[in-house]
Amino acid sequence: MKILIVGAGIAGLSLWHKLKSSDHEIDIIEKANEHAEKGAGICLPAHAVRQLANMGLKEQVLACARKVQEVRFETSQRKLLASASLLEEPLNFQPFIALRRSELIDVLLEQAKTSVKYSTTVKDISGNSSVTFNTGEVKTYDLIVAADGINSQIRHQVFEQPDLLDLSVTNWRFCITSKNHEVQPSYLLGNNEVFMFYPISNDEIYCYGQISDPKKYWYNLDDKAALQQVFAHYHESVLQAINDSQHIVAGRLKSVQSREVYKNNCVLIGDALHGCPPSLQQGVNMALEDVAVLANALCKSQSIEDSLIEYKKLRLARIDWVIKESNKTIKLAELGKYKVGRFIRNAIVKLTGPTNVQAWKKLI
């Protein structure tokens, strides 16, 4: 079978790893002219690490990651609301880790680099199988896998509902240096905004901030200035982190509305398929699960159509659940916009514990 993987990010490279030893003929393309560092940090719960272990990449990833042991939910002034250990069952079957996104890409890219065709995009797909590239080359494929992110070019070219749903949340990501810190993942809940500290090495912390903002007001400001305004009433540790920030990545939270999954011989994986909000740190895990299920379906069935039917059947319910729970976590944070809502939200967190940990238990 001839397979084209569009996008050499986490999802695309993971699928290449899964299929590289198969009898399939694999092409993988990337629109960038090289892999540059993008994003900031990524958090990998135990079930994501399980997928990396199944790919034989766990030890390489652990070598450049930070293991975490506890999750803390705090007020904006860092008063503890609830905490949960990650060393207890069922959460401890694999380590919980965090690392720079670029370091995970480097691990995935180590064997695949010579196979990736850079500066290459799909210009046209005709007859469900003939692909014309921006280079002018034309090739025929049995399967086209869109792993090209939430703004997927293939989804826009092929699928009937390509548009994204804006979740009315502005966010910022950056990393700071903090020598020999003892930080555990901490989520600070304020009014309608949240700030997160997540350690990614002994000397580095990934920081994430978001605010519910239907009018996109913060896009009118410099990123650091916007962060300083949004989190002005937060604990001094947050203000110091913002002052120390460099290379801030700003954006809007969006999700994929379509649930088509595949059309003809084109199938979506990773953020191109679901683009779930980061509330539960499920982006990488969902992509790795997509890859595992699709690869298994392709190996089990002689028919591409049967493989894609099986893939859709096994993924849709889980995707819907993760997106629903991720959005629920955003709505819970937004309760803090008013004093009564803030009291109710904090009481819920104190009673039930960190919401992401509760979701991880169900996912595992």
Image: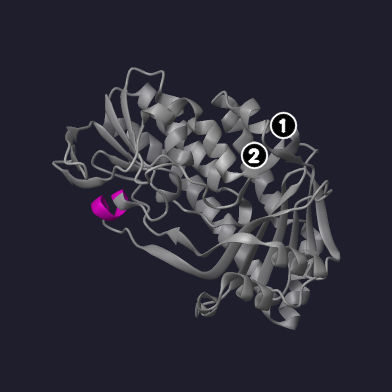
Residue drawn where x is 51% and y is 32% of the image = 108
- 241 with respect to 15 (left or right): right
Q: Percent position (x, y) of residue 29?
A: 33, 38
Left or right: 53 as drawn, with respect to 14:
right
The mark lying in front, picked from 1 and 2, is 1
Is residue 296 visible in this depiction of the protein? no
- Within 10 Å of the Cα at label 2, are there few (<14), some (14-19), or many (20+) other Cα atoms? few
Q: Amino acid at mark 2?
A: Ile
- Magenta highlight on residue 199: no
Q: Assess whether mark 2 and mark 1 are in contact (beta carbons under 8 angstroms).
A: yes
> Residue 358's x, y, as percent?
70, 51
Q: Position of residue 81 (x, y in %)?
A: 83, 63
Q: Which residue is mark 1?
A: 93
Prevailing SS of the magenta stretch: helix
Q: Residue at x 33, y 41 (%)?
A: 267
Task: Name the residue located 61 percent from the left edge and 72 percent from the top edge.
Answer: 211
Residue indicated by mark 2: 364
* Quadrant position of the N terminus in the picture: top left
**Front residue of 235 and 347:** 235
Q: Is residue 91 above or below residue 247?
A: above
Q: Name the image quarter holding the C terminus.
A: top right
* Label 1 SS: helix
State the residue lying farthest toward the left.
127
Q: Which residues are magenta?
A: 154-159
Q: Is residue 36 rendered to the left or right of residue 41? A: left
Give the residue type at disc 1. Phe
